[in-house]
Amino acid sequence: MKKFLWILVALVAVFGLALPGCGDSSTNPTTSAGPLKIVVATDATWAPFEYVDTASGKIVGFDIDLMNAIAERAGLQIEYKNVEWDSLLAGMAQGTYDAAISSITIKPDRLEKMNFSNAYFNAGQIIVVRANNTTITGANNISGKVGVQTGTTGDDEVSAMTGVTKVGYDEIGLAFAALLTNQIDALVCDTPVADGYVKKNAGQLKTVGGILSSEEYGIAVAKGKTDVLNKINEGLAKAKADGIIDQLIQKWLVG
Ligand code: ARG
């Protein structure tokens, strides 16, 4: 009889947790749902929002900090993929990635191909010229060769201008290099990026004219991935309530 009891105890010890109704699986971390794993694309050529830190080789920036803050608050586990801008947009339209954070302006033609989170930042387009340029003072007298990153809202803006020759680049850094070496006369890009390059190249570059557009950045989410969209919006709302956006503005854009 004693022996039988010991066998029973041993059986419960070995199989107990696997039997329905035995053990509380909700308190067992190995059997609870765990974080939702998602692949997030970014074109890390857009400092200070997303770029590769040369010292560490890591993708860093405002957007990365924000996405991590969202993930922490919404139970998401992120794998970042650094991809070129055109592949990022195409991949989001095809559902290759779950989401993308990349200073992406929410606009109607993109909303047909992908969903967007609630907006998290306001930016606009601005013209950048060499500091010694006295002829181009704004959109009304811009002329010559004007650089853009192909497929961006800067591209849209310059495409709509008359009397300019648009020069498209795969990365905005190449357009800035061309501007600094007199290969183009101006470029158009998002305000925070323009301000960053002007600061880094003190005395060589300046922004001119007013802000050409009013745009809102959102996190793109592949169509059909409603659970991902909901979690991102939930985490974003919490991050906003926690003052994260203001902290990131201080960290990445001010000073
Ligand atoms: N805001 C602009 C757009 O949506 C430019 C974004 C470019 N982002 C980047 N990481 N290259 O078109």
Image (tube, rainbow, N blue to C red):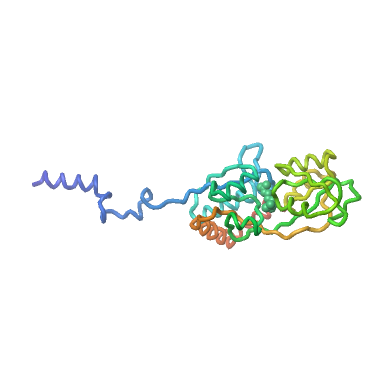
Residue depicted at 91% across the width and 50% down the height: 135
Work out whether residue 3 or residue 88 is closer to the camera in this orientation and state it.
88
| Coordinates of residue 198 in the picture (x, y in percent) | 79, 47
Q: Residue furthest right?
A: 134
Q: As displayed, is residue 147 above or below residue 75?
A: above
Q: Is residue 98 left or right of residue 124?
A: left
| Coordinates of residue 208 in the picture (x, y in percent) | 84, 53
Residue depicted at 83% across the width and 42% down the height: 184
Work out whether residue 155 or residue 236 is closer to the camera in this orientation and state it.
155
| Coordinates of residue 206 in the picture (x, y in percent) | 83, 49
Q: Residue furthest left?
A: 1
| Coordinates of residue 249 in the picture (x, y in percent) | 68, 55
Work out whether residue 42 or residue 21 is closer to the camera in this orientation and state it.
42
Q: Is residue 255 visible?
A: no
Q: Is residue 125 left or right of residue 95?
A: right
Q: Is residue 197 visible?
A: yes
Q: Is residue 48 left or right of residue 24?
A: right
Q: As displayed, is residue 121 above or below residue 44?
A: below
Q: As displayed, is residue 189 above or below residue 56?
A: below
In which quarter of the view is residue 55 placed?
A: top right
In which quarter of the view is residue 45 placed?
A: top right
